[in-house]
Image (tube, helix red, strand yellow):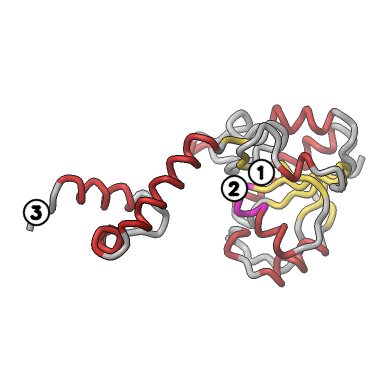
Amino acid sequence: MSLPNRVEALIEALRRLPGIGPKSAQRLAFHLLERDRDGARRLAEALREAVERVGHCARCRMLSDAETCAICSAADRDGSLLCVVETPLDLLSIELATGYRGRYFVLHGRLSPVDGLGPEELGFDRLIRRLEEGEVRELIVATGATVEGEATAHYLAELAAARGVRASRLAFGLPVGSDLDYVDRSTLAHAFQSRRPTGASQP
């Protein structure tokens, strides 16, 4: 059976979402068109607004609809602590699971030459400038426990050590091969509180 071109286009667009296969995309498309057209309009408007107005914080690279995000703008955050995460989801996980009150830097990935992700793509030049400003005393490396995450952590520890900044790594409790957004809150909180020095990070 052939579906209208616009329905097919909607299904293909929904398939771009992570974890959505052909069948799930079809169900979502049919639901929006058959039972929730008002919801579909709100979704379309929210997507349009987000795509057009949400960018990245000039300071930490977190998603933001202002030049500087709310965390970087907050006067009550501890600027001597800088937590480096792979994704905005990782930042959100730490905010929800821990009492951390420092600041962040979002890489939007991890070192992976195969995927074309090197220091330039991950914003390391901006991170180096943060470290050289002199405010940061501890760089908390919160990359995932994957091979690429560990390689990124080692690289970050070397950057910190070269600038006299202590680097620590999230401690035990994180399963090897895991990403932070899949780790439950209590495990993440324990790992965060038990972070340890990493690499040649002692200044």
Quadrant in which residue 178 is drawn: bottom right
Q: Which residue is mark 3?
A: 2
Q: Is residue 72 above or below residue 1?
A: above
* Magenta-highlighted residues: 86-91
What residue is at 7 percent from the left and 58 percent from the top?
A: 1
Tell me the distance, in whole angstroms, between the alpha carbons under discs 3 and 2. Answer: 43 Å
Viewer-side residue, 76 vs 123: 76
186 left or right of 176 in image: right
Circle 2 packing at 10 Å, graded few (<14), some (14-19), many (20+), is: some
Q: Which quadrant would the C terminus be assigned to in this image?
A: top right
CA separation in Å, label 1 and label 2: 6 Å
**Residue 30, located in which quarter of the rendered image?**
bottom left
Which residue was labeled with disc 1? 152
Residue at 78% from the left image edge and 27% from the top image edge: 129
Q: Which circle's residue, 3 or 2, is located before the other in the chain?
A: 3
Secondary structure under the numbered disc 1 in the rendered image:
helix
Mark 2 highlights which residue?
148
